[in-house]
Amino acid sequence: MLVRLMYASRAADSVGTDELAAILRRSRQDNHAGGITGLLCLSGGIFLQVLEGGRSQVSALYNRIAADARHRDVVLLSYEEIGERRFAGWAMGLIDLSRLNPALLLKYSEAAVLDPYALSGRVSMALFDELIATASVSCSP
Ligand code: FAD
């Protein structure tokens, strides 16, 4: 039984390049072992993350992540049972937003900033899908 979960959160002030690198290092190591795949995006202090994998593994990881002091205001945006993974190639890829076209954010939002708190889960997932298609996904922060 595979599931896909997406949440948003606000990064703690302490989270910079080094902390993001530490999160990604730990994620890639543990996700590989737990059969979890997905993508992480950090823009303007907002995290957006998609996790895919077995239901109990994704559920346990989400609970661990939600309790992490490196972010706050964790909001579950979307949860669904899936037949196949979308991000099978990524133990945890980082979406590089530096080359993002602001028009894409405006397509789904009132302003050209990433604000999943102002969007429905369905729209957040649609935006995420387009982010993946237009931004590059990297292995390093
Ligand atoms: P431990 O390593 O025992 O740590 C316990 C607590 O200490 C953590 O919850 C955290 O609050 C804190 N902590 C740990 N390391 C640091 C540090 N370097 N700096 C500051 N505080 C720290 N983990 C994954 O395995 N897969 C993921 O995909 C994943 N994605 C994440 C996305 C985000 C946005 C964040 C903030 C964290 C993510 N993590 C991920 C890390 C996750 O929250 C846990 O820290 C990790 O899974 C280890 O869990 P643990 O219970 O063994 O914690």
Image: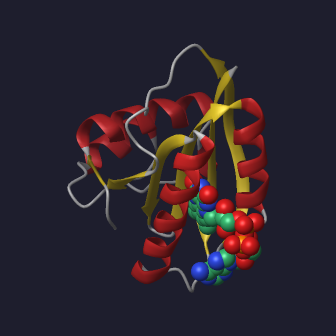
Q: Is the residue 37 above or below the residue 61 in the image?
A: above
Q: How many marks?
A: 0
Relative horizontal placement of residue 109, taking residue 97 as reference (left or right): right
Outermost residue, front direction?
33
Q: Is the residue 92 above or below the residue 121 in the image?
A: below
Relative horizontal placement of residue 61, taking residue 112 as reference (left or right): right
Question: Which image quadrant for residue 27?
Answer: bottom right
| Residue 68 visible in this rendered orientation of the protein | no
Which quadrant is the C terminus positioned in? bottom left
x, y (%) of residue 51? Answer: 58, 41
Front residue of this view, candidates 7 and 39: 39
- Colour scheme of this structure image? secondary structure
Task: Report the image quarter containing ligand 1.
Answer: bottom right
x, y (%) of residue 96? Answer: 30, 56
Question: Which image quadrant for residue 56?
Answer: top right
Q: Residue at x 46, y 29 (%)?
A: 126
Relative horizontal placement of residue 138, taking residue 35 as reference (left or right): left
Q: Residue at x 56, y 86 (%)?
A: 14
Outermost residue, top direction?
83
Q: Is the residue 32 above or below the residue 86 in the image?
A: below
Q: Residue at x 72, y 49 (%)?
A: 62
Relative horizontal placement of residue 80, taking residue 141 as reference (left or right): right
x, y (%) of residue 24? Answer: 47, 64
Which quadrant is the N terminus positioned in? top right
x, y (%) of residue 12? Answer: 62, 78
